[in-house]
Image (tube, helix red, strand yellow):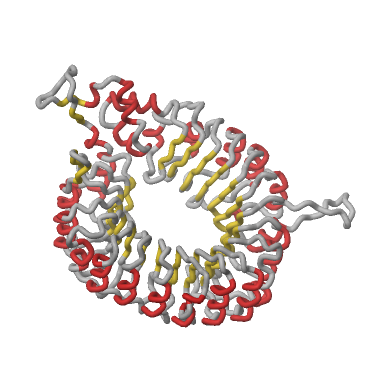
Amino acid sequence: MAESSVRRVKMKDKAPAQDNGGEISLDRLSSEVLATIMTKLDVSSICAISVTCKSFRVCSQEIFKFLPNFHLLEIAAPIDRLRRLLLPNASLRSLKLDCRRMNESSIDYLLQPGLLELSLRNCFRFSGRLLAEVGARCKDLRSLFVSSVADNRGQLHDVCDLEGLLRGCTQLEELVLMFDVSIFRRPDFARVWNLASAKLTCLQFGYITQLMVTELLSPTVAPNQSPNHIVPPVFPNIQKLGLSVDYISNTMISIISHNLIHLTHLDLRDQPIIEPGVAFDLTDEGLQLINQHGRLKHLSLIRSQEFNPTFFRRVTDQGILFMADRCTNMEAICLGGFCQVTDTGFKTLLHACTNLYKLKVFNGTRMTDLVFLDMYATSLALTLVSLRCCNLLTDSAVLQLALNMDLIMLDFRDSRNIGDKALQAISKLPKLRTLLLDGTDVSDVGLSYLRKGAKSSLVKLSIRGCKRLTCKCISSLFNGGSNRELRELDLSNLSDLTNAGVLLLVKNRIPLVDLRMRHCPLIGDMSVMALASMTMADGDRWHGSSLRSLDIFNCGGISKLSFQWLKRPYFPGLRWLGVAGSLNHELVDSLAVDRPFLHLMTHYA
C-alpha cells in the first residue's frame, strides 16, 4: 500500500471535508489517525507517500522520531530525501540502508548513538573514515554490515580507521566487512585486531589474501615476552567465519581449524587468477584438517570461476572420505569446483552426515545419478538442494531426490540434462517453495505438471534461458487458476515469450511481487501497459499492481510509451526497475525525478 493506493478511503460515518460518494481525502484525517495508518506500512512505502503531499510528509517525519527500525534496502534513496526523515531518534535501534547515492556528508544523519544494528550497503562514495566514525558514534553496536567502501575510488584504507572502529565498538558480536580489506597495510592490519571485542562470534570479509588470514589468526609473541609465553587467541569466541580469498590452501585450513576452537560455520571462497601451485592449493591432506574440534555444522568450500576456469584439481575421493569421518554431525555442505571427486566421494558424504539438511554442489563435473540411487536407504531429511552445472545428472537423480517430501528448495540451474520427467516428480512435493530451473531442458509440457500436481506451495520459480520453452509456458503454469501462491517469476532470456503471454498472466491476476523478463526480444509496450493496468482484489477492495520489482532490461519492444506507464500513479508499489537507459537518457532521468524512491537499474547485470 503506497503512493496513489493510499490516497482515498471510504468512511461510513459522517465526517468533515467529504467528497462526492461519501469519500474523504486521507490527507484531511487527523494526524493521530494518519500516524496509526502509516505505522502499518514498511519504511519504503512511508518514504514513497511522504513525497505526495505536505500532510503525509509532516506525519512521516513525526513517525520516524520514534520508529525503532529503519530498513530501506530495496531502494537507494538520496540523502536530500532521507535528511528530513532520519531525524534524531532515541528509540532507533536498527538502521539498514542502500548508500549508493550517498557520500560522507551523510554520516551525521546515519550514525545515531542508540544503534544496536547497522547495515550500510554499496558505500562506493565513502572512504575508510566511515569505519572510524562508526566506532566513535555507535559504541553500543552489536552488529555491523558495511559493503563496497571506496570500491570505485581506488584508495588505500588507513588502518587507523579500522582501529577506531574496533576500539570504539567494544560490544560487537557480528562484523561483516564486504569489501577488499587487502588494501589495509600489512602487518598493521593483523595487529589492530587485538582490540576486537571478545564477544565477537561472527566475522566476514569481502576479500582478503590468504597471507593476511595467516597473519590474522596466528598469535604473535611480543618482543619483550618469553618465546614460551602462551598467547591467547585473537578471536576466542568466533563461531561463524566467512572469507573470500585469493587461494584456499592447506596452510590456511590448518590455521583456521586449529585456532578457532568454537567454529560452527565455515564459508570459504577463492577466485584464483591463475592455476595455483601445490603450496597455495587445497589437497586431500588439507581436507583431513577440517573440523579438528568437532563443532562444525556448516561447511562451504567454493572455487569461483569468475576470473579463470580453475578447479580443486588436487582433491580426490580419498580426501572427501577422510573429511567425512570428522563431519558426521554436519548439517549443511556446499562444495564448488571439485572436478576430481566422483560419485564415491559425494555418496560417502550423504551416508556419513545423517543430520544433513542442506546440500549444494556447483560444477560437480563427475557427479552422476548414482549418487542418489539409494536415497531411500538413508535417514536424510534434505530440505534445500542445489546441484548447479552438474551436467551428468538426469531426471533419474531428481526422481530419487523427490523421495524427500520435506524439500522446500531445489536449484538445478545450468544442469542441462534435467527435463520434464523431473518436473513430474517435483510436482508431488507438498512443501516446495523455491524452484530454479535456469538453462535446463524443461519444456511447456513439463511446466504443465507443476499445474497438475498437488496443491501448489511454490512461491519462487525461475525458468531463465530454457531454450525449449515457448510463449505457451505461461498457460502451462497458470491456466485454471493454478499456482496462485507464486510471488517471484523469472522469464528472462526466453526468445519466444511474447506480449500475449504477459496478457494471460494479467488475465489470471497472479499477485506477483517480482517479475523479470530481461532480454526477451518480443516483449514490448503492450506488456508494460497490461501490467500497469492490472488490478488486484483484496477482500472487497481493489488496488493496483502488486509488483515491487520489474525487470524489462533490453526487451526489444520497449519504447517511449512504456516510460509513460511506468510513472505514477501506475505500479504504486514498485521499488526496483530494470530498464535500458542507453537509448534515451532523458526518459530515464524524467522517470527518476517522478519516482525518487525507485531504484533504477539501467545497465547490464
For residue 415, what is the image quadrant? Answer: bottom left
Which quadrant does the N terminus fall into?
A: top left
Residue 125 located left or right of residue 296:
left
**Vertical placement of 415 versus 357: above or below?**
below
In terms of depth relative to the viewer, which is nearer, 212 or 468?
468
Residue plotted at (56% across, 49% down): 176
**Vertical placement of 95 versus 413: above or below?**
above
In the rendered image, residue 540, in percent from the top left (x then y), is placed at: 18, 39
Residue plotted at (67% across, 70% down): 250
Residue plotted at (29% across, 71% down): 466
In the rendered image, residue 309, in percent from the top left (x then y), is placed at: 49, 75
In the rendered image, residue 450, in percent from the top left (x then y), is placed at: 27, 66
Query: Is residue 384 at all visible to an observer of this figure?
Result: yes
In the rendered image, residue 378, in percent from the top left (x then y), is placed at: 52, 73
For residue 35, what is the image quadrant? Answer: top left
Residue plotted at (78% across, 51% down): 232
Query: Is residue 252 at all visible to an observer of this figure?
Result: no
